Amino acid sequence: MPPPTTLRTITDALLRSLLPPVCQICADCGEHDRELCGACSLTLPWHSDGCARCALPLPEDADDICYRCEEAPPPLDACWASLRYEDPVSGLLLRYKFHSDLAAGRLMAQLMALNPPPWPLAPLVAVPLHPSRLRQRGYDQAAELARLIGAPCWKGLRRIRATAPQSERNAEARRHNLDGAFGVVGEVPQAVVLVDDVMTTGSTLHACAETLREAGCQEVNAWVCARVP
């Protein structure tokens, strides 16, 4: 009997031949086996000019690191955002995160793979949901992105304390909301790449990075789908 991965590949190929991809943005025909048409692909806000430590957009004449990260280096060694959190990406991510639109998430992972970080990938570590939130939502959006990207993943980072949604808090409240929220199970790799869907203030990624460093990780980078500018 063929292994599950082979069966999945065959099934996906059959589905693509019977049901051609439809653009997730305008419902026109997709191109290149992606659920995105050529016209909508031209509207994507690709992000390639961000600070190397926090991924915020930089002025044209700036160095690789913004003045904020120079004055107060974050716990991330490097940070990369494939896209900016603007239309149509913002709408797709809202559908994926809050409306169980897994097809939108699949497209987001494909777009991340088209604009990967400029540095080698260590094992991917998805920013985890608390078990109670996972039961409520039914899936972990960051873990799905990491899985769909297809690189090796490490699953030892856990959210051990349920926290209120970050989207409902300002920057200062976001930082304190995550105190003691994460823990580690098992031996930590020497280097990892945190993966998340959206980076706003960076509080969640920073809390994860600090937890991993306390557990012995030497290098923590982050790769997000979209950065809020």
Image (cartoon, helix red, strand yellow):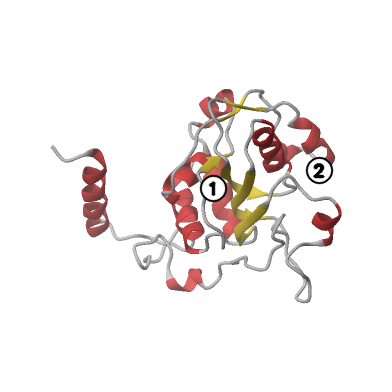
Please report contact status of discs 2 and 1: CB closer than 8 Å, yes or no: no
Query: In the rendered structure, which amino acid carries the disc numbered 1?
Result: Arg
- Is 83 situated above or below 175? below
At which x and y percent is residue 2?
A: 16, 40
Query: In the rendered structure, which amino acid carries the disc numbered 2?
Result: Ala
In this image, 121 relative to 21: left or right? right
Which residue is nearer to you in this view: 56 or 25? 56
Task: Mark 2 or mark 1: name the one nearer the start of the chain.
Answer: 1
| Quarter holding residue 110 | bottom left
For label 1, the crowd category at 10 Å Cα-Cα, with few meaning under 14, some 14 to 19 and many 20 or more, is some
Tell me the number on the disc at residue 171: 2
Q: Which residue is mark 1?
A: 95
At which x and y percent is residue 150?
A: 41, 49
Which residue is nearer to you in this view: 171 or 191? 191
| Quarter holding residue 1 | top left
Query: Residue placed at 62% from the left, 38% from the top?
Result: 217
